[in-house]
Amino acid sequence: MLDLRFIREHPEEVRNGIQLRGLRVDLDRLLDLDRQALAARQERDDTASEQNRLSKSVPSLKGEEKAKAIERSKDLGKRLKPLDERIAALEAEMRPLHLEIPNLPDPEVPPGLTAAENREVRRWGEPRAFDFGPKDHLALAERLGLVDMERAAKVAGTRTYFLKGDLVLLELAVLRFSLELVASRGYVPHAPPLLVKREAMEGTGYLPLGADQAYECTRDDGWLIGTSEVPVTAVHAGEILEEAKLPLRYAGYSACFRREAGTHGKDTRGLYRVHQFMKVEQVVVCRHDADESRRFHEEILGNAEDVLQALGLPYRVVALCAGDLGRSQSFTYDIETWMPGRNGYGETHSASRYYDYQARRLNLRYRGADGKVRFCHTLNNTVIASPRILVAILENGQQEDGSVRIPDVLVPFVGKDVLLPR
RNA sequence: GGAGGGGUGCCGGAGUGGUCGAACGGGCCGGUUUUGAAAACCGGUAGCCCGCAAGGGCUCGGGGGUUCGAAUCCCUCCCCCUCCGCCA
């Protein structure tokens, strides 16, 4: 979230950010409530101050004077209660509004409201020219006996899948390869809890807005994570870290769950858009320094690009325009990987910087060398997400006979270099 | 799931109704001393909110209550530890 004080003092800047994103948020209501809360708190503090002063004098007083002081203090105490209630009510009304205020888009964010206005930053690799009619990943995988979609639907409903046989090994391989790559660069692997508390979801910005995209376990007050960014960024929530320990480079490895509400009829075929998937994620927690944030943003973007290059998959990097940006993010690069079955690029990675937006929600801070406590900056990016990456591997690696060549770097993990019909 | 014990500052650990935001020890920072270091000694060392400041308010796991006054009493929730049962 944004600093309430900042919102109070720079309302037009905040309003402008909301407008760039094409959002509607009741900023004025928040500002009005804030004014009321501020006044109420002032009155409360003054009253409490007076009461504290009296209470402290009680032990040193006697007889008549003592009785009077206690009387007067009692009166003040009675005035305190309604004030506290009023403040609590105001804060309760403010909280959701405050949490809904989106992050300020970074100045380098391209203007625009829809994905069509995202800016392509660069391309790597040449989409393969087929001298036969390429199949999509589902056709390939079914023919190779590597998936069972119908029975997954029977057992688990829509947007689910069974991976089978060598495809399971291939998934493990690509996850393992990716995790090792970032681990070798100092990202400490974390296998996190998948079911987390509301605070972790709220702290990373996936609640309250976004509740319809996450699976809630109401009986146990828990939420299934849609990304390990949630638990891994929240690891140090509420802590004051030592500056010398920063930056933290963490890698999350987990299953991820998404309801995909509102996407009916979109990407319904195959393994592209599913309710459950595996992901290796990179998370960086660094100092409160915009330049540092930008540097780490390039670093985590580069790590993902290195993974795709090692896999030999063509991709492009796009900078999301203001309207396509998530509410919590200040700047996001997506990486889209070439998928012959779509005859186009499909999103496989998303690298974002938040500045202190998440850190504020998580109360994630550090003590600087000067002794001052500041909010950290946070960033994250996909390293690899499966099965979506399998879509690209299968489709790009296919051969005319329906077999699939496995990227060289994965061969040691799979134990073979080509997936053949059984 | 049953029985018991416990959650205090960076750490250890006092504190069971009154000037306690918190003794004492350790750590850390600064200073004195020293050729330098160690030791010793002196001082400092939580966060949040309002305020230009002075200052005020809030916080001793979270929330609520009793009281003129709560770290201290009561209720409730959470977490940790030990033992028993069950299970991977």
Image (cartoon, coloured by chain):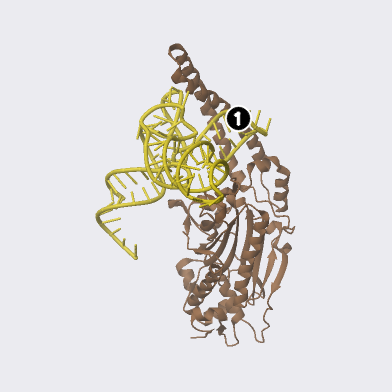
Chain colours: A brown, B yellow
The residue at 70%/49% (across/down) is A18
In the figure, is residue B33 to the left or right of A121? left
Label count reads: 1
Q: Closer to the camera, A395 or A369?
A: A369
Q: Closer to the camera, A99 or A351?
A: A351
The residue that label 1 is drawn on is A42
Quadrant of residue A348 within the rendered picture: bottom right
In the figure, is residue A143 to the left or right of A102? left
For mark 1, does the 10 Å Cα neighbourhood hold few (<14), some (14 to 19), or many (20 or more) residues?
Answer: few
Q: In this view, does A310 lie above or below B79?
A: below
Q: Where is residue A365 in the image (x, y as percent from the top left)?
A: 56, 49
Q: Position of residue A284 (x, y in %)?
A: 58, 59
The residue at 51%/74% (across/down) is A171
In the figure, is residue A269 to the left or right of A110? left
Q: Is residue A207 visible?
A: no
Amino acid bearing label 1: Gln
Q: Position of residue A288 (x, y in %)?
A: 63, 52
Disc 1 is attached to a residue of which chain?
A
Quadrant of residue A315 within the rendered picture: bottom right
Q: Which secondary structure lies at badge 1? A: helix
